[in-house]
Image (spheres, rainbow, N blue to C red):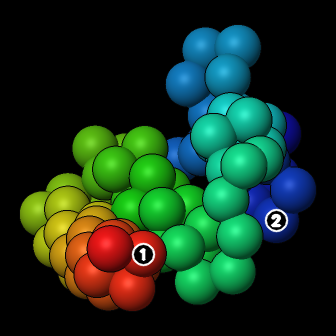
Amino acid sequence: MNDAVNKPKHYCYGKYECINVLEDVLKDLNGLEAFCIGNAFKYLWRYKLKNGAEDLKKARFYLDKAIQLNEISEEVND
């Protein structure tokens, strides 16, 4: 049975579930940076199983924001 709330099919690949992988990917990130990277990762993870190009565009939006945040951080630290 598909559990659309706790374990949606579009977030599961084989033995991996997106939320579990994200726990490791985001463990050293904080705040808005973690949010943006997490969302980009989520949309890339599910794009083939859910919304195709729309999810890729959403991932790009969040990646662009993460890049912008990173560049601002680098300028401040220089």
What x and y, as percent, mark residue 34? 61, 67
Instruction: Please name whichever residue, 17 or 4, is drawn nearer the observer in this view of the structure.
Output: 17
Camera-side residue of 77 and 72? 77
Reading the image, the residue beneath label 1 is 77
Give the numbered dot on residue 68.
Answer: none
Which quadrant does the N terminus fall into? top right
Outermost residue, top side: 15
Residue 5 seen in render? yes
The residue where tag 2 is placed is: 5
Kindly state the secondary structure of the residue where label 1 is placed.
helix
Q: Residues within 10 Å of mark 2 (few under 14, many from 20)?
A: few
Q: Amino acid at mark 1?
A: Asn
Q: Is residue 54 something one can see in this rendering?
A: no
> To which quarter of the image does residue 25 belong?
top right
- Horizontal side of residue 45 vs 34, given as left or right: left
**In-front residue for pair 74/26:** 74
**Residue density around tag 1, few if under 14, some if 14–19, many if 20 or more, within 10 Å:** few
* Lateral position of residue 42 relative to residue 66, left or right: right
Residue 31 x/y as whole percent: 69, 80
| CB contact under 8 Å: marks 2 and 1 | no
Circle 2: residue type? Val
Looking at the image, which residue is at 74% across and 35% down? 24
